[in-house]
Image (tube, helix red, strand yellow):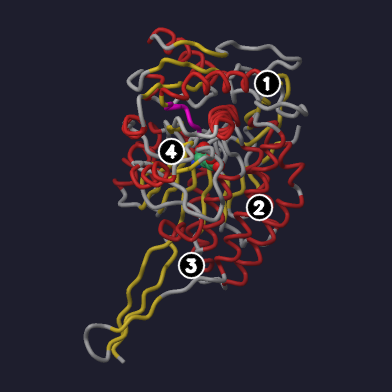
Amino acid sequence: MTIYQNLIGGEWVGSDATRNINPSDTNEVVGLYADGTVEDTKNAIAAAKAAFPAWSRSGIWERHVILKKAGDEIMARKDELGALLAREEGKTLPEAIGETIRASQIFEFFAGEALRLAGEIIPSVRPNIGVEITRDPLGVIGIITPWNFPIAIPAWKIAPALCYGNTVVFKPAELVPACSWAIVDILNRAGLPKGVLNLVMGRGSVVGQTMLDSPDVTGITFTGSTGTGRRVAAASIEHNRKFQLEMGGKNPMVVLDDADLSVAVEAAANSGFFSTGQRCTASSRLIVTEGIHDKFVAALTAKLETLVVDNALKPGTHIGPVVDEKQLKTDTDYIEIGRKEGAKLAFGGELIKRETPGFYLQPTLFTEATNQMRISREEIFGPVVSVIRVKDYEEALATANDTPFGLSAGIATTSLKHATHFKRNSEAGMVMVNLPTAGVDFHVPFGGRKGSSYGPREQGKYAAEFYTSVKTAYTLA
Ligand code: UN1
């Protein structure tokens, strides 16, 4: 089998490989991917540092052309890359193709942003002095990505990093190196100068740690678990380094008595269970007012009965497998915790066998949960959702906000008054009205509050806040 290597200073290197397993069919090895060492990571950082001066001064047309070419190739290969994504991560083929299209759109967006770089000219308060405000690139950006969006999250970090003139050391999650390798290969062939984008696949404890320890990494953008996020923060403070964290969620979806039942059920089923519930934007707390509670639970349960859990590549599959054995154990442990805490198991909870051996788990719905239970407070990151019954809108809003997280929040209602009040008073970074809490646009800001996020927003033109440093220059005329 071919070994997919790391890209360091424009050269493909590395041999010690790790196997990437298909969670829909654990007999299948998706590929062999290089296992980066401390030395590889140091070389990658040195290459990125050496490439920075020239790339930071490169023309905006050159950046535009490279990012556009990458976006075009990803779109042209959406079916093939989507299938690769579905094989390595386990989301369904339509979801995986959708994510690949999103990655392409992100490159197209930042190809455009490269041509729109601008600053401000402002008069000084002192006579005969002009003030210019511009944005400089940060330098070497360390990019650390999670396994649940193997192509979109790398795209939404790599594209802005390059657009604003930074160089990159990129470490994808160990479980999903295939799509990362593919987009690095695409960008490399699109004409990036040597050392501008370096790929170091491998373990967090080796590659990630070496990035954290290096004073030459001037910014780190991280999406992943809260625990690792805290380590990124602590190490970055040590180096006075800029950092951006996107961590967990325990996103609420409020369903009010006046909701359109089918809109509420569709939004809840999508947010809670699609992509196997493995999205930081997934909704795992359904906060439902008394008048609609029983009708809503009955309709959602009926909907869950129709959802097919099977091999991600099989036509007709709605929910693919859980990503790996470790995550499956976390999910089943939480199902046990929910039972012990006294929530009522209304649907699912069991492992299932399919034609191919994989990590298949039924979508699982608890009812009669309270907001104080561990299943309502801790991020599970699987297809496990709790329904919490509340009296009225006021109690629903208070319950929605009573969480250590603050990424996304939803409300299903036909009341303009409640929708408006919820948009204003939700303590989340993103609020969705009559829509799933997950599934975001590529051209507008993404991010949360409280325990979910730290630092500037990602995506859209707001991405510049992280990937650049503002400069204020005064000139005596
Ligand atoms: C989405 O819901 O469309 O890790 C994107 C995550 C998020 C991305 C969610 N950073 O799930």
Q: Which of marks 2 and 4 is in front?
A: 4
Examine the residues drawn in magenta and state their main secondary structure.
strand
**Closer-to-camera residue (323/336):** 336
Judged from the image, the secondary structure of the residue bearing numbered disc 1 is: helix
Mark identifier at residue 104:
2
Q: Quadrant of residue 325 in the image?
A: top right
- Whether residue 200 appears in magenta in the rendering, the answer is no
Residue under circle 3?
53
Q: Distance between the residues labelled 2 and 3?
A: 27 Å
Q: Nearer the viewer, mark 4 or mark 3?
A: 4
Q: Distance between the residues labelled 1 and 2?
A: 32 Å
**Closer-to-camera residue (55/378):** 378
Q: Which residue type does callout 3 highlight?
A: Pro
Q: Quadrant of residue 3 in the image?
A: top right
Residue under circle 4?
409
| Mark closest to the chain's N terminus, 2 or 3 | 3
Judged from the image, the secondary structure of the residue bearing numbered disc 3 is: helix
179 left or right of 430 in image: right
**Label 1 crowd (10 A; few <14 / some 14-19 / many >=20):** few
Q: Distance between the residues labelled 1 and 4?
A: 26 Å
